[in-house]
Image: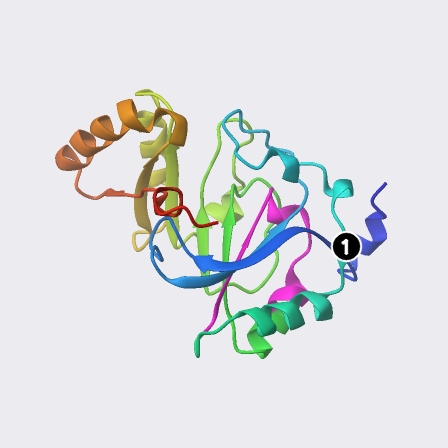
Amino acid sequence: MTNESEIKNETLLPVMESFYTLQGEGFHQGKAAYFIRLGGCDVGCVWCDVKESWNADNHPKFSVEEIVEKAIQNSKSTQPLVVITGGEPLLHNLDNLTKALQQAGFQTNIETSGSSPLSGNWNWVCLSPKKFKAPLPEVVKVANELKVVIFNKHDFEWAEQYALQVSENCKLYLQPEWDKRETITPLIINYIKANPKWQLSLQIHKYINVP
């Protein structure tokens, strides 16, 4: 079982995988980025494509120093971008990890459902709220990007509820759930044409077959 003191003190973090690729979604789409996928999630999205990340105990644990060193070795950019994702990364205290990454010259971005308390120092917060466990107000108010996955037509109204809660400078994206993209994408296009404050986010990494 996970030693809770290890997580709280940030001495070790469960890493499912890490890889250098292109950001496939949202505002930073198309940019080279080093992804760190942390294990552990208590949200349980039915459409999740990384359900193997849910149990943190199934993944090896690494020190902050080890995680940052690997990021340095694998990133090629002169202004490297790191994306912390999951699972649900905010299940872990990320203060020391983001501090160390920024000291090493990285821009720190997070992709989160916002359902756990905010930790870490972030250059960009991508909030992707889920109906299965609502985001906390403290995360909603600092979001730079709101990315709502559209699974059915009722999700548009739900997305608007969060558009009213984020800051006026927050970027707004609607993204089709991958398995329903053929039917949902046309609905999103029509919705954005009628509500142009929103933009379309596609999972281009899946179209071009990269991680």
Residue furthest out toward the front: 209
Q: Is 139 placed above or below 18 here?
A: above
Is 161 above or below relative to 5?
above
Q: Which residue is denoted by mark 1 in the rendering? A: 61
Q: Magenta part of the protein: which range?
A: 80-98
Q: Amino acid at mark 1?
A: Lys
In the image: residue 164, left or right of residue 51? left
Find the residue positioned furthest to the left.
193
Q: Quadrant of residue 188?
A: top left
Name the side, left or right, on which 22 lies relative to 85.
Answer: left
Crowding at mark 1 (Cα within 10 Å: few <14, some 14-19, many 20+): many
User: Toward the viewer: 84 or 96?
Assistant: 84
Q: Secondary structure at mark 1?
A: strand
Magenta stretch holds residue 84: yes
| Residue at x 57%, y 37% (from the top left corner) | 50
Q: Is residue 172 visible?
A: yes
Q: Quadrant of residue 84?
A: bottom right
Q: Where is residue 93 shown, x and y percent of the image? A: 68, 55
Asked whether, in this view, residue 183 is left or right of residue 35, the answer is: left
